[in-house]
Amino acid sequence: MLRVARFKLAATTARRFYSQNNHLTFVVLEGEPIMSHKAKVLNRLDKMGYTTHHFDHFLHQWIADNLPPPYDALHKYADDVEATIKNNLTKDNHKGNHVFIDGSPLTPILYLSPHSQHVRMLKDRMKQLSQQYKIRSFVCESDFYEAQFRLGCDKYELVERDEKMIEEEYIGRFRSHFDGEIVLSKEDEIVNFVHHKYRELQNEGWFEQLIYTSDTQQACCKLLEILNLRFKLPDMPKWT
């Protein structure tokens, strides 16, 4: 009898828990991380009390884990995204019932040949996640000149921090993977390519809307407005 009672209690608790999290929405922010500064959008949302999760740059993870490209790296990245979603489903007290993440199975597509069989696999993984969970996807993009400026700053900061990493090596490690074969070194070429690539994905219907992230504060306000999430600034401390 005691065992049956415990089982019923566990079942009731589980039903109540999944009922509460059934309305949990995962907001995916896509975009080239350096050019879009989507991590800064996440940081601001985090300060506003929302649940956020930041993923390492796909290429950085690939190099750090020394994974054989591209099959294992692609599946590992997609698995990490799904594990993050499942992990947040086991928690409660998500502000506004929304969780913001800056990665999805679509993220690595920017660095793969459009003819690669893995592109279809990644799109299928994204489709499966969208069917299993409530997901709303947006693509983040800064204006053309701001994107160039951010790329240039990132390049020289890295080279200055690591004296052994000369500019050519930086380009070879982090910028020769577009479409799996294209080598781009000039900032304007990279911006044009990335913007065009995400436009293609948006035309295929993967993204709900484009969010301009040249100004982080405006981007957050626009995103929350689209999601119909009311927000206000925190109360000012009272003088005593």
Image (cartoon, rainbow, N blue to C red):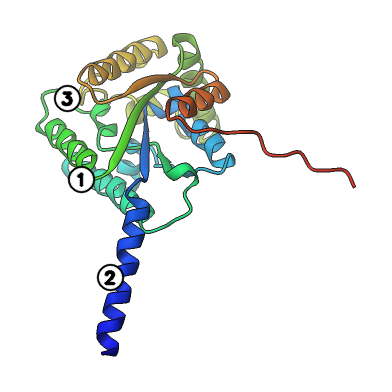
Q: Specify few, some or many for label 3: CA neighbours under 10 Å numbering under 14, 14-19, or 20 or more.
A: some
What's the CA distance linking mark 3 and mark 1?
16 Å
- In the rendered view, tell whether residue 112 sits above or below residue 195: below
Mark drawn on residue 75: 1
Q: Give the structural element (helix, strand or loop) at label 1.
A: helix
Is 62 left or right of 239, judged from the image as shown? Answer: left
Q: Give the structural element (helix, strand or loop) at label 3.
A: loop
Q: Nearer the viewer, mark 3 or mark 1?
A: 1
Q: In the rendered structure, are the residues bearing label 2 and label 1 in contact, judged by CB atoms less than 8 Å apart?
A: no
- Residue designated by label 2: 11
Q: Specify few, some or many for label 2: CA neighbours under 10 Å numbering under 14, 14-19, or 20 or more.
A: few
Q: Quadrant of residue 127?
A: top left
- Residue designated by label 3: 113
Q: Residue at x 49, y 19 (%)?
A: 152
Task: Out of 94 and 23, give the one closest to the viewer.
Answer: 23
Task: Please state the horizontal and vertical placement of residue 237, each as a whole percent of the image.
Answer: 79, 43
Task: Please state the horizontal and vertical placement of residue 29, each as a whole percent of the image.
Answer: 38, 31
